[in-house]
Image (cartoon, rainbow, N blue to C red):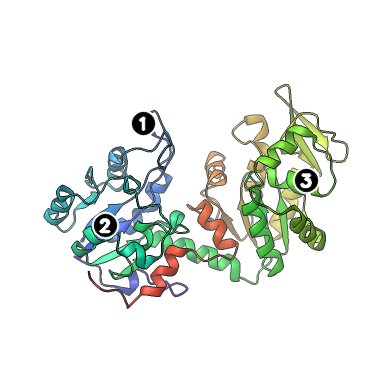
Amino acid sequence: MIDGIPTLDDINYDRKSILIRLDINTPIINSTILDKTRFRSHIDTLKELENSKVVILAHQSRPGRQDFTTLENHARVLERIIGKEVEYVDDIFSSCAIKKIKNAGMGDILLLENVRFFSEEQITRSAEEHSKSILVRKLAPHFDIYVNDAFSASHRAHASLIGFPPVLPSVAGRLVEREVNALSMVLRSKKRKVFILGGAKIEDSVRVLMNVLINNIAEKVILTGVVANYFLILDGYELGEVNKRIVEENKESIDDKQVKEFYLKYRDRIILPVDVAVDVNGEREEINIKEYGGKGVIKDIGIETISMLSDLIPSYEISVINGPAGVFEEEQFSIGTFEILKAVAKTDFSFVGGGHISTAARMCGIDKKVSHVSTGGGASIRFLSGEKLVALEVLKKYWGKSKKL
């Protein structure tokens, strides 16, 4: 077990019928799967279950989006990555799908259709309520074990994530185990820690900021990206109308008064940029934050800030980075994100969050040099914020109590 969460080590899974929830949700453009990282992240779990009948539940995007599509191409990608046939089933719990599940043999792998095609999948309900859904009632009787290896979706109370533990013996897969171990080590270690929070999701970063400073988890927190711009505005700096608008668009339900009070109390442990790089007619221009009057769009931290952080970050034993320092997709504004990642890689233990920052880590070749690159943006943020991940809490709650339908 890890933190009370049962894992594959706690159950006999050899030659069993296993229903497993993966997260292979990925960017798709013109029917082409662009990133195979999440597929590779599940290799260890799937290899370990190779003597069992494995049926996969997964999702792609959400209703209404252009990349909300079937999992047929996902089956082909997964097949190539694990080097074993993966049969795509174009339904979830129809009589045809159930027949294929029954007829599959030990060692076979089936990938069922996009579970979000099931209209009740994304309804927020309790585990007990979801366990009575048609999805669970149709599928559960055909399996011995349920495995959750979808760490990046485990903060969601969806049917395929929390509906099976009340009725099937349920454990976490190896990916979930790795993620929880890395995150728990970051939060519990007494070693000197620095957090670097960037990107555009201000509310998420504020939750992490408050948790790690109030609970003395981090010695310092460095802010970059739109998150830093928000705090610069709170600190009285004039960033211009365009940058203010970008901040406003990304604040969500944040309480400015509460955050400012927190900032004033903890400002000696919060590090903000001393200069920024702005886009002036397509060119990068470095401006000291005290001299900046709002000309041009801020797209990166400046060279002076980069130099300061490159020296500071390696002085810590543990570093955690979530969110880029700027618009790293544009070459002239990528230097801040890439140089900070290089500094992060020099600490004894380095944790890179999911989402855009993990993409940046791969782009600059740092992903192989850091200690852990997370697959779960939202899930990692919530874990670091001190929140419980509902799909993992359900595994704890029903371990040893689940019953067959």
Q: SS at mark 1?
A: loop
Q: Left or right of 363: which side holds 148?
A: left
Specify whether residue 247 is in view: yes
From this view, report whether residue 151 is shown above or below residue 249.
below
- Distance from disc 2 to disc 3, alpha carbons, whole Å, reads 52 Å
- Distance from disc 3 to disc 1, alpha carbons, whole Å, reads 40 Å
Depth check, mark 2 against mark 1: the one in front is: 2
Q: Which residue is disc 1 drawn over?
A: 31
Q: SS at mark 3?
A: loop
Closer to the chain start, of discs 2 and 3, is: 2
Depth check, mark 2 against mark 3: the one in front is: 2
Q: Nearer the viewer, residue 103 or 256?
A: 256
Q: Which mark is residue 273?
A: 3
Quarter of the image for the C terminus: give it. bottom left
Amino acid found under the numbered disc labelled 2: Ile
| Residue 283 at x, y percent in the picture | 72, 24
Closer to the chain start, of discs 2 and 1, is: 1
Disc 1 packing (10 Å; few <14; some 14–19; many ≥20): few
| Residue 193 at x, y percent in the picture | 67, 63
Q: Left or right of 233: which side holds 395?
A: left
| Residue 276 at x, y percent in the picture | 77, 38
Amino acid found under the numbered disc labelled 1: Ser
Amino acid found under the numbered disc labelled 3: Pro
Q: Left or right of 4: which side holds 273?
A: right
From this view, report whether residue 92 is shown above or below residue 391.
above
Q: Which mark is residue 134?
A: 2
